[in-house]
Image (cartoon, grey):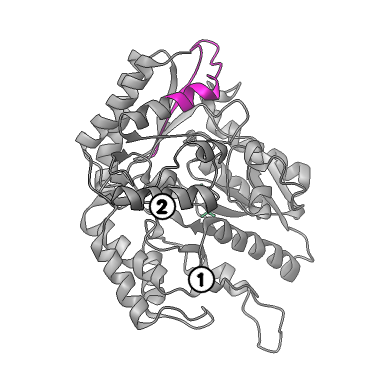
């Protein structure tokens, strides 16, 4: 369906301005200099329209797992507008009404945690976690226990330190030197592990964390940061026993667990948070994208009361507290949007929908796998699913990146936006990614899966 969006002259002028002056994220800008960049102008539910009026079904929630409650939510826009008209901003050295209310509601969903620190991007929320670990080491451990362990294939953000904590070589390449004190341990993707078929693979993969802690020296390691389900590194669902073993190891060596819920947070996997599928008790939880579904920029670093208490000191001790500020962490529109976003997820029973539609999506993708040899593996949790493409099922050799890109492009031609691992792991940018909004229906899923089916039927290897 095409929709009249703007007159042709306006559209051409906007496209020209974009082409002339906007530097787009993540993608090569050269093709846009030659062709027309896509400009998205409107959205409703799972549908978006470009400036030429062409409609698309967005199966990736704004490209990067963000618009969880779907587009065009007037009630969120109203909540933000009302808040901004009343009190737009004051530094978070003071409180604001939606900030207090959202923290209260959020903590209700996170037993064992109790403090919310506001900032405005996932990277920044993670940086707060790293700063807490570093300062805790300085305050309590003579500067020891300052290292952060991270996992191969996980991504934790775009700043130099968040990249230092990321296990995606193509994101990191050419941006070093990196921040010292960040150490990698292996991923837990059974499909790509030599011992992936072992019945206790989850435990074995987690034991790699212990190996690295012991190599570094437990008295130097402060925390481990993990995505509950790895997103851009290939949609990796932790194998059985993994997080339970991570918990056991971290308890044993006094290592804090930092869960990066930037993608999984707020319902994407069928529970409020991804870690809640497992028997694990994080000390730090970070979240961003789905917190306000992209209607406002907000991120949160959530900690235990115990960790918060470590930073309480007499006012005379001027350097003994968390001396951090995020200017826009004081924007009151963020928590206003987050409160309404949470209300929608609850009132519309969206967690339930994620579980039902997630099962349906998995079934449909498994049926596609039966039909198309090129699909080597299908994995995911809730409405967060990936299909890894291979040249040959036996050898599991990944397809060239251009093949995955071709599938995405073909789906787009059919009016369906799907994603793929992109500038992530060398040779392994071969996983198609699906993360439709939590409101999606069976009909939406059928449309998404049919487009992939068509694209795979047309593919030239
Ligand atoms: C797991 C994870 N953590 C952190 C980030 C960084 O978030 P932001 O881009 O908001 O800084 C991302 C972004 O994609 C992410 O996927």
Q: Which residue is the site of mark 2? A: 14
Q: Which residue is the site of mark 1? A: 329
Q: Position of residue 379 (x, y in %)?
A: 42, 30
Residue 48 image label: none
Q: Which residues are magenta?
A: 384-406
Q: Is mark 1 within 8 Å of ligand 1?
A: no
Q: Nearer the viewer, residue 102 or 196?
A: 102
Question: Could you tell me if residue 262 is visible in this image?
Answer: no
Q: Nearer the viewer, residue 98 or 404?
A: 404
Q: Nearer the viewer, residue 228 or 402?
A: 402
Q: Nearer the viewer, residue 85 or 365?
A: 85
Q: Is residue 6 left or right of residue 234?
A: left
Residue 424 vertical placement versus 51 (above, below): above
Q: Position of residue 136 (x, y in %)?
A: 69, 66
Q: Could you tell me which residue is drawn at 50 percent across and 64 percent down?
A: 120
Callout 2: SS: helix
Callout 1: SS: helix
Q: Position of residue 450 (x, y in %)?
A: 27, 25
For the residues labelled 2 and 1, the Cα–Cα distance comes to 31 Å
Q: Residues within 10 Å of mark 1 (few under 14, many from 20)?
A: many
Residue 443 vertical placement versus 196 (above, below): below
Quick check: is 106 in the magenta stretch? no
Question: Could you tell me if residue 415 is visible in this image?
Answer: yes
Specify the quadrant that holds the N terminus: top left
Q: Could you tell me which residue is drawn at 47 percent across and 21 percent down?
A: 389
């Amino acid at each position: 369906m095409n929709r009249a969006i703007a007159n042709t002259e306006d559209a051409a002028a906007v496209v020209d301005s974009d082409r002339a002056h906007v530097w787009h994220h993540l993608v090569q800008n050269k093709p846009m200099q030659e062709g027309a960049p896509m400009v998205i102008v409107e959205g409703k539910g799972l549908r978006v329209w470009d400036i030429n009026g062409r409609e698309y079904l967005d199966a990736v929630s704004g490209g990067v797992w963000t618009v969880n409650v779907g587009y065009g939510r007037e009630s969120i826009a109203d909540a933000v507008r009302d808040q901004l008209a009343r009190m737009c901003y004051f530094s978070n050295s003071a409180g604001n009404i939606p900030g207090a209310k959202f923290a209260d509601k959020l903590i209700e969903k996170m037993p064992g945690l109790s403090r919310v620190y506001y900032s405005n991007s996932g990277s920044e929320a993670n940086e707060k976690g790293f700063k807490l670990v570093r300062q805790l080491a300085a305050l309590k451990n003579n500067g020891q226990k300052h290292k952060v362990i991270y996992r191969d294939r996980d991504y934790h953000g775009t700043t130099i330190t968040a990249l230092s904590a990321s296990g995606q070589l193509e994101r990191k390449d050419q941006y070093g030197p990196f921040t010292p004190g960040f150490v990698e341990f292996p991923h837990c993707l059974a499909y790509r592990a030599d011992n992936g078929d072992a019945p206790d693979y989850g435990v074995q993969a987690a034991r790699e964390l212990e190996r690295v802690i012991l190599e570094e020296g437990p008295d130097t390691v402060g925390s481990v940061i993990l995505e509950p389900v790895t997103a851009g590194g290939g949609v990796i669902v932790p194998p059985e026993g993994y997080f339970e073993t991570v918990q056991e190891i971290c308890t044993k060596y006094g290592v804090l667990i930092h869960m990066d819920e930037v993608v999984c947070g707020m319902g994407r996997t069928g529970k409020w948070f991804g870690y809640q599928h497992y028997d694990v008790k994080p000390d730090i939880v970070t979240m961003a994208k789905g917190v306000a579904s992209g209607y406002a920029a907000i991120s949160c670093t959530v900690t235990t009361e115990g960790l918060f208490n470590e930073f309480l000191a007499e006012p005379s001790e001027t350097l003994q507290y968390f001396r951090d500020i995020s200017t826009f962490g004081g924007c009151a529109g963020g928590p206003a949007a987050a409160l309404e976003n949470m209300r929608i997820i609850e009132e519309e029973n969206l967690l339930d929908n994620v579980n039902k539609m997630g099962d349906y999506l998995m079934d449909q993708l498994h049926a596609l796998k039966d039909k198309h040899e090129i699909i080597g593996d299908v994995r995911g949790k809730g409405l967060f699913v990936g299909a890894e493409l291979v040249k040959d099922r036996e050898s599991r050799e990944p397809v060239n990146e251009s093949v995955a890109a071709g599938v995405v492009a073909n789906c787009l031609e059919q009016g369906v936006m799907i994603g793929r691992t992109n500038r992530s792991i060398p040779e392994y940018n071969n996983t198609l990614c699906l993360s439709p909004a939590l409101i999606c229906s069976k009909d939406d899923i059928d449309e998404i899966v049919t487009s992939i089916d068509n694209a795979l039927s047309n593919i030239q290897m």
